[in-house]
Image: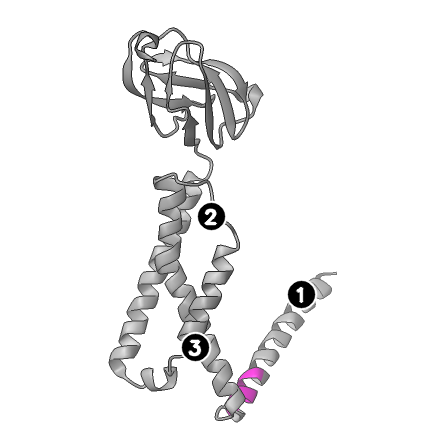
Amino acid sequence: LFFFKAIIPALGLTLFFIFWALLIEIVWQYRQSAFLLILTKLLIAAIFALFVYALIYLPLEFLMTEIWLITPKIPSIVSPILLIILAGGFSLINWNDKLKVKSWRLFLLVFIIISGSVYLGYRQNKLAREYLPKIYNISPSWGIQAQLIEIRGVNFFPIWKKGKILFNGQEMIIKSWNEELIIAEQPVPAEFGKTALFIVRSDGIISNKVPFEVRDPSTLK
């Protein structure tokens, strides 16, 4: 039994090295062929497109979804379309000539290091914020006594784990609660004016604060 447990990984590793050895030999043998040159050019363009994507698009996506809270997520179709456009654009560059220049090779090395660092930072911060409660929109952004307020966002927890909605030191009356939508009623306000509204989840984690105005009904026309 031990023999079979040891021989299977060894055979797999041997086949892996044989595959790559044959692949390298074939590539070296046909290194000057038109097909391989085109394939190499496309591969370099694809790699470069990935690093540009990591350096520019991912930080912008992070700002829009996690910092500015414009939208919970960007449509998934955007990423492949952007990568195809970038790869197509970079494939028009004559990389064989560029890579012969020492300064270009140095630039590409620095660019790859920076892009890789940005990607790692993006993943780390994205994971850290993935389960935080986030308010993206409240409607309306002002309220009077007994008015219903819709709060839209993500990670609010289900109804059996509902938390609190606070504004100006007061707690709103919960009418409906789910992971992405809360409907609350404004109680009798202690005072009028502009304040901040936020959610305190049942585990004690606080959401982002959004502007909210408590209006005096007597001033409404």
> Which numbered circle lies on residue 6?
1
Q: Secondary structure at mark 3?
A: loop
Is disc 2 surrounded by few (<14), some (14 to 19) or many (20+) residues within 10 Å?
few
Seen at 67% across and 65% down, the residue is 6
Seen at 45% across and 73% down, the residue is 88
Amino acid on which disc 1 is placed = Ala
Assess whether residue 100 is covered by the magenta stretch. Answer: no
Residue 134 in the image, given as x and y percentages of width and height? 42, 32
> Mark 1, mark 2: which one is toward the viewer?
2
Seen at 38% across and 12% down, the residue is 144
Amino acid on which disc 2 is placed = Ile
Task: Reply above or below: 15 against 122.
Answer: below
Residue 159 in the image, given as x and y percentages of width and height? 56, 21
Tell me the quarter of the picture where residue 48 sits: bottom left
Query: Which quadrant of the rendered structure holds the N terminus?
Result: bottom right
Q: Which residue is mark 2?
A: 74
Amino acid on which disc 3 is placed = Ser
Give the colour scheme shown.
one colour
Of mark 3 and mark 1, the one earlier in the sequence is 1
Q: Which residue is mark 3?
A: 91
The boundaries of the magenta stretch are 23-28
